[in-house]
Amino acid sequence: MRILMIGAGGVGDAAAKIAVERDFYDVFVVADYDIERARRTVASVQARQPGENRFHAVTVDASDENAVAAAIRLTGATHVLNAVDPRFVMPIFNGCRTAGANYLDMAMSLSLPHKDAPYDKAGVKLGDEQFAQASDWEGAGRLALVGIGVEPGLSDVFARYAADHLFSSIDELGTRDGANLAYFRPDGTEGFAPGFSMWTIIEECLNPPVVWEKSRVVGGNVETGFFTLPPFSEPEVFDFPEGIGPVECVHVEHEEVLLMPRWLDAERVTFKYGLGEQMISILKALHTLGLDSKDPVTIKGIQVAPRDIVAAVLPDPATIGPQLTGKTCAGVMVTGTGVDGQPRSTYLYHVADNEVTMRDYDAQCVVWQTAFNPIVALELLATGAWAGAGVRGPEAFDAAPFLELLAAPKPEGYGIEWGIEER
């Protein structure tokens, strides 16, 4: 296996540090628009493993599918890991199809709200552009594994595991994400900093959130499918494990809702995120002021998107690790009927402690928790434990090999524990 990872720093940097400990691939190329950033990621890996010679750096323009295809051919990559913002999904995805490489990402192609009823009907959904090409990928015998970060990703693996081993029928697959993270400025005062790309936070939190329902009554008629709600709808307090505690969560647009119903049978699929009062207030203000816009405006003769300005003035999520404290939790709450025929409510989850991830990988907990999942998936593909063609989500594959490899002690596995909590 020859891996081309597009995107250095942040999640890409953490993924490389995790991958260097494994031996399932021959070459790992880090590609970035900024070649120096790619070289820094390679250097950080080589500092962890002196004498490591499988890692290399190249430059690529992720917005140009022809440039992506050229980089694949140059490096001989068999698998491409997309580790950049979702706005670059389609050029990388198309570049892989053109050059004949397999593809993995941690966030799917972007959505567009319904033109006439954005808070009721789904428009172009997350991943629609990718799934439209599923037959082409399957016909070519290539795999596009979409949404294999933590959420989406590990949450989808948990959902498949619950469906296969814990439940005979499922009422709701409810992904729930929360944290007790705090950011402190260099002077010691508490401040605001996003745990991951602010560009992406604005995108997914201000878009109409999508919900799947098998039986939704509308005007006396029963409908099946996807529908939307206003942002921040249906707040609920969810009690997260391992000391995080109760956090108010709200509906947010997310890939799990678009992926799980394709392969898993459930009455309802939802995603709620513990944004917190401060983040919700900030997002509402950005929207009111038009600072969430992706459309460029001209400022003193220079064109720039307001959203890019917001992301640029905030602390870089890749560098805030030393100034963070606390834990973050990703998981899925499954309710329904257990295999014993009795009602069951089970939360399958993973918690990352920032102190531990900084100590072991010099990576803040949110990016590290996202980064290990595509590396585990790549190893399963390399060994043949996972195999297939077409455009597929994580829940299309047997969850047991993933979770077993994840939790197995090093060096056989990754030594990353996950939990099950009955509610």
Image (cartoon, rainbow, N blue to C red):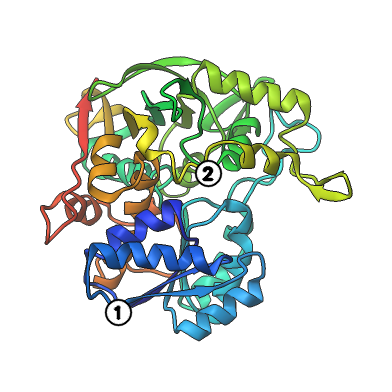
Q: Is residue 401 above or below residue 179?
A: below
Quadrant of the rendering where the N terminus is positioned: bottom left
The image quadrant of residue 355 is: top left
- Residue at 34% in and 44% down: 369
- Residue at 31% in and 48% down: 362
Q: Label 2 sits on what residue type? A: Leu
- Residue at 69% in and 28% down: 120
Q: Is residue 393 above or below residue 111?
A: below
Quadrant of the rendering where the C terminus is positioned: top left
x then y, percent, for residue 191? 49, 23
Please, what secondary structure does the residue beneath circle 1 have?
loop
Quick check: 318 left or right of 164?
right
As measured in the structure, the alpha-carbon distance from the residue carrying label 1 to the one carrying label 2 is: 34 Å
x then y, percent, for residue 409? 10, 53
1 or 2: mark nearer the eye: 1
Quick check: 124 left or right of 163?
right
Q: Which of these two is toward me, 71 or 230?
A: 71
Residue 258 badge: 2
Q: Which residue is mark 1?
A: 26
x then y, percent, for residue 169? 32, 34
Q: Label 1 sits on what residue type? A: Asp
- Residue at 29% in and 68% down: 46
Q: Which of these two is toward me, 34 or 64?
A: 34
Q: Which of these two is toward me, 25 or 123?
A: 25
